[in-house]
Amino acid sequence: MLCDLLISQKSVAIFEGNPEVGPRALGHRSILFDPRNKDCKGIVNKIKKREWYRPFAGIILEEKFSDYFQTCGIKKSKYMTISFECIDGVNEFVPGIIHVDNTCRIQTVSHEDNPFLYELLKHFYDKTGCPMLLNTSFNSAGEPLIQTKKDALTMLYSSDLDAVYFNDQKKIFFS
């Protein structure tokens, strides 16, 4: 169901496990979107109430990382702290996560590190041929990361976000 929502160009926030620590959306409090959509930056910036020029990061199946990015021998990038130049054509394939300098701050996802997010990415890849999703923190500009389910539902109903998925309940709420 989540994969189908993403394929149908819906924004989906994930509320899974404990909240994240630090400035990066690592898949526990994230907003996800299909990076193949050329308008996705504008769509997600509107949800987050951010400036139009703000870039987004992506998540990718760890085993597909070097197929799309110049990794300089690095095998994984678990924390979205390094930008990698994309291989020719990737910027046209996933324009929603590629910056104007042809790079992306990418997070690799393995089954070991995040089974839930890995399975979602794998399912998306199997259906679309794209092993990536846009991933950004689940919050509005200037606001702290979402901490509680109440916070998650408040953002859902006060923004252009399409859905929130509570993994512990296996339940989706729609705006």
Image (cartoon, rainbow, N blue to C red):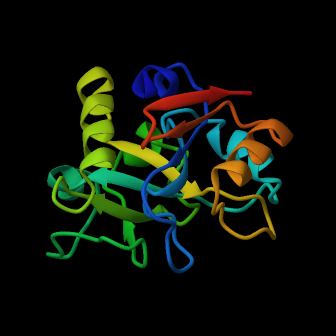
Residue drawn at the location 66% of the way across and 66% of the way down: 145
Q: In the visual, does 17 lie left or right of 131?
A: right
Residue drawn at the location 26% of the way across and 66% of the way down: 70
Q: Please provide percent x and percent y for residue 168.
A: 42, 43
Total labels drawn: 0
Q: In the visual, does 38 lie left or right of 2?
A: right
Image quarter (top left, top right, bottom left or bottom right) of the C terminus = top right
Image quadrant in which you'd find residue 76: bottom left
Between 65 and 156, which is closer to the camera in this rendering?
156
Using the image, determine if residue 142 lies above or below residue 27: below
Using the image, determine if residue 140 lies above or below residue 37: below
Using the image, determine if residue 165 lies above or below residue 52: above
Image quadrant in which you'd find residue 113: bottom left
Q: Please provide percent x and percent y for residue 136.
A: 57, 57
Image quarter (top left, top right, bottom left or bottom right) of the N terminus = top left
Q: Please provide percent x and percent y for residue 51.
A: 82, 60
